[in-house]
Amino acid sequence: MMTDISLLTIVRGRRTQLHNLLRGVAAQTRKPEEVIVVFMNEAIPDQLPDPGCKMYLHQIADPDHPLPLAAARNLAAANASGRLLAFLDVDCIPHPEYLELLSTAVRQTHGVVMGDVHYLPRAIAAEGWTAEDLAELAVRHPRRPVIPADRSLIPLAYHLFWSLSFGLRANDFARLGGFDEGYRGYGGEDTDFSFTARQTRIPMYACKARAFHQFHPTFSPPYHHLDDIIENADRFYKKWDVWPMEGWLKQFVADGYIAWESHTIRKLRPVEAKTLAAARSDSPFG
């Protein structure tokens, strides 16, 4: 039986972040009918916070890729019963009005609607926070679109799509064919999804549905995903005749780790420990 809204998230590790996300769902002014969680290459935990609605837990295994992002999102969608799908990254805590604003925007536009993610500059505990605390701490990403105060949403350029927080109708997700599972592991699947939306003429928008991204150290550029990025960039180029993730690829070339020419890309050597250490970033934006 079809329901109204399904909230979907995928996870590997990140237990504190998942607990915070679920507590945020429980505080929604417009609760989803269900939460779908897909665990990537790990066991389903015995206990999780109550999100205030039905919750269904699934697993996906890919021994060659620790983060099978595209396949995990598709598995979540395949098990969802909602007419509207809200995809929220496990690192994000939804503001209490998140689903109310996101679902309204999707219904108004019949498009893919990206939420407004703000970034927490330090880690928070799994308990004791309030939405007001998060709103006071969080900062806006300097390269994300700003929605004017007198507007509820704005058109979004396809290349700016980011899958941290977005919603769309389930039938439009089906029209798009979901995420291309030819992208294995990390990198490229977001931009491919947005290019497919452009090709299919499904519009994209950004709305004011806030979520708060929980801090975690990362790597910039993401050398810990070098092999996945090379493989996925090559797939993207062969499909769309343009290279994705150019900023990262240029840095990999400059550091001597890949050979990247007009039509080809290949790895030259393994990433050195000193390179990985130098790439570690404590920026809230990664």
Image (tube, helix red, strand yellow):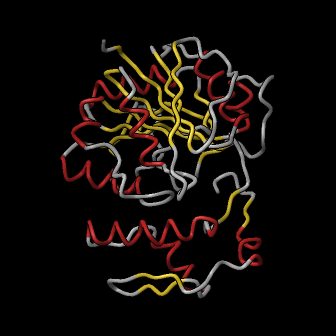
Nearest the eye: 237 or 254: 237
Where is residue 126 shown, x and y percent of the image? 77, 28
Where is residue 235 shown, x and y percent of the image? 35, 67
Nearest the eye: 131 or 34: 34
State which quarter of the image contains the C terminus.
bottom right
Residue 5 lies, with reference to residue 42, above or below; the image says above
State which quarter of the image contains the N terminus.
top left
Where is residue 270 shown, x and y percent of the image? 63, 80
Residue 171 lies, with reference to residue 120, above or below; the image says above
Image point (33%, 53%), residue name = 158
Q: How many marks?
A: 0
Where is residue 273, by image quadrant? Answer: bottom right
Where is residue 242 shown, x and y percent of the image? 31, 72
Image point (47%, 23%), residue name = 99
Where is residue 191, by image quadrant? Answer: bottom left
In the image, taking residue 239 as reference, residue 99 lies left or right, namely right
Image point (58%, 53%), residue name = 66
In the image, taking residue 267 as reference, residue 138 lies left or right, namely right
Nearest the eye: 268 or 115: 268
Image point (46%, 82%), residue name = 266
In the image, taking residue 148 as reference, residue 219 lies left or right, namely right
